[in-house]
């Protein structure tokens, strides 16, 4: 049987051991990170009444400000806008008969560069859905075309 | 019996994360403490404590209010911590296949605490012995001890939390204290030469 003083001593040392295993500052930081990671409230939604109220308040204040702004101030702003100059130039002119129009990139070479498509098999099992498949040995890709209202006359 | 957490629990049942985060905020340290009391290791205790809260959040709709939320939380935490100890033991036993039998049984002399006041050194030595005594206890014994000595729960509360008989609670506490008392006696008997498991097996 353990004597009462020994029991108290055991309890005291036991609590000291547990205290050493707990760094309150670290625990708080871990707790905060854990809560933020898993249980943080969702970001404010556009559809929440609070957001609507905020937006309405901002709108109302804007309208009020525009209403009370002096006309002179508004005229000054519009005058400033007229002083904005064009920054990008435009070149205009006619194309002479003999001059060749050069497209860049060249559409002919572009289209030629594309691989020729060989349709090796065509099947249609579900009415409006038509399946075209290229030669599987060459390109193992199936192309599915869905034709709306196909098959309906 | 009025449960002070009932309102937050009801909100959490409706999926209110903010309400649940208040419960986490309130009980995080408690759950960590009981996990640490059973596991005796910081990081596994932290991981287990966090797993407990995630599990509780998922299962909170199953909480019917038959006991206080805190008691229910203790129970889940205890079971999770005991499971974690068993998982670790299994893992360690697999990892330890390379270790030789001789190494496991070799007596380890606990190093001297170094210079300093005699009482401090004796206190440190005592803690080391106590820690070793705790390691030798089963997780169930450590669970009862942490609830009694750290959480200050009565025998009845421990019995309710762990869903065991009060007699079992009393016998486990008695056994745990006895083991620790032996460490106290060993301390008074001279140099501490005891058999200790290698660090890797903890």
Image: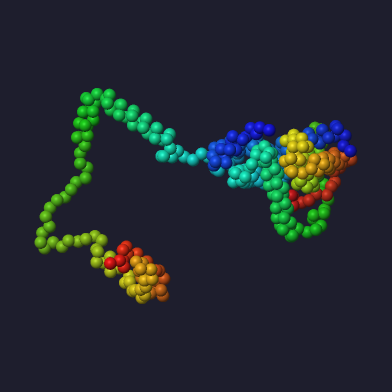
The percent position of residue B161, horizontal first and vertical second, equals 72, 41
Asked whether the viewer can see residue B182, the reply is yes
Quick one: which residue is furthest to the left in this view? A97
Q: Give the number of callouts.
A: 0
Q: Nearer the viewer, residue B76 or B101?
A: B76
**Residue A19 placement: quadrant:** top right
Q: Quadrant of residue A123?
A: bottom left
In this rendered view, identify the residue nearer to me: B48 or A149.
A149
Q: Residue at x 78, y 51 (%)?
A: B197
Relative to B171, is B201 above or below? below
The residue at the point 19 percent across, 35 percent down is A82
Rendering coords of residue B136 (x, y %) = 80, 47
Is any part of residue A17 visible from this angle?
Answer: no
Give left or right: position of B56 versus A139: right
- Left or right, B189 with reference to A66: right
- The coloring applied to the image is rainbow
Q: In the rendering, at what x and y percent does residue A79 appear?
A: 20, 31
Is residue A93 placed above or below B165 in the rendered structure? below
Residue placed at 82% from the left, 47% from the top? B109
Q: Identify the residue at horizontal 16%, vertical 50% (top origin).
A: A91
User: Residue B187 location in percent, x, y?
Assistant: 85, 39
**In the image, is B49 to the left or to the right of B198?**
left
Observer-nearest residue: A16 or A36?
A36
Which quadrant of the figure has residue B32?
A: top right
- Viewer-proximal residue among A146 and B83: A146
Quadrant of the drawing holding the N terminus of chain B: top right
Residue at the outermost front position:
A153
């Amino acid at each position: 049987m353990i004597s009462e003083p020994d029991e108290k001593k055991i309890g005291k040392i036991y609590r000291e051991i547990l205290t050493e295993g707990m760094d309150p500052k670290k625990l708080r930081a871990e707790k905060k990170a854990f809560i933020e990671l898993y249980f943080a409230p969702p970001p404010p939604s556009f559809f929440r009444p609070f957001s609507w109220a905020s937006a309405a308040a901002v709108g109302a204040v804007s309208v009020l400000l525009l209403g009370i702004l002096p006309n002179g101030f508004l005229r000054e702003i519009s005058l400033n806008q007229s002083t904005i100059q064009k920054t990008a130039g435009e070149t205009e002119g006619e194309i002479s008969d003999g001059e060749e129009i050069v497209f860049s990139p060249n559409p002919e070479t572009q289209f030629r560069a594309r691989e020729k498509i060989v349709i090796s098999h065509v099947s249609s099992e579900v009415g409006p859905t038509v399946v075209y498949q290229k030669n599987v040995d060459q390109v193992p890709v199936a192309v599915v075309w869905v034709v709306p209202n196909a098959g309906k006359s | 019996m009025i449960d002070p957490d009932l309102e937050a629990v009801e909100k959490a049942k409706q999926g209110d994360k903010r309400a649940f985060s208040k419960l986490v905020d309130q009980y995080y340290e408690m759950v960590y403490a009981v996990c640490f009391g059973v596991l005796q290791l910081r990081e596994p205790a932290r991981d287990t404590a966090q797993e407990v809260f995630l599990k509780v959040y998922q299962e909170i709709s199953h909480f019917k209010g038959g006991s206080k939320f805190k008691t229910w939380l203790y129970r889940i935490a205890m079971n999770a911590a005991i499971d974690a100890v068993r998982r670790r033991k299994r893992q360690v036993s697999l990892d330890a296949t390379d270790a030789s039998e001789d190494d496991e049984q070799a007596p380890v002399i606990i190093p001297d605490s170094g210079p300093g006041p005699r009482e401090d050194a004796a206190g440190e030595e005592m803690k080391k012995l106590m820690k070793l005594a705790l390691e030798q206890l089963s997780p169930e014994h450590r669970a009862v001890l942490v609830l009694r000595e750290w959480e200050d729960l009565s025998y009845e509360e421990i019995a309710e939390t762990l869903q065991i008989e009060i007699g079992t609670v009393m016998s486990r506490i008695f056994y745990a204290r006895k083991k620790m008392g032996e460490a106290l006696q060993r301390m008074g008997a001279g140099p501490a030469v005891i058999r200790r498991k290698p660090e890797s097996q903890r």
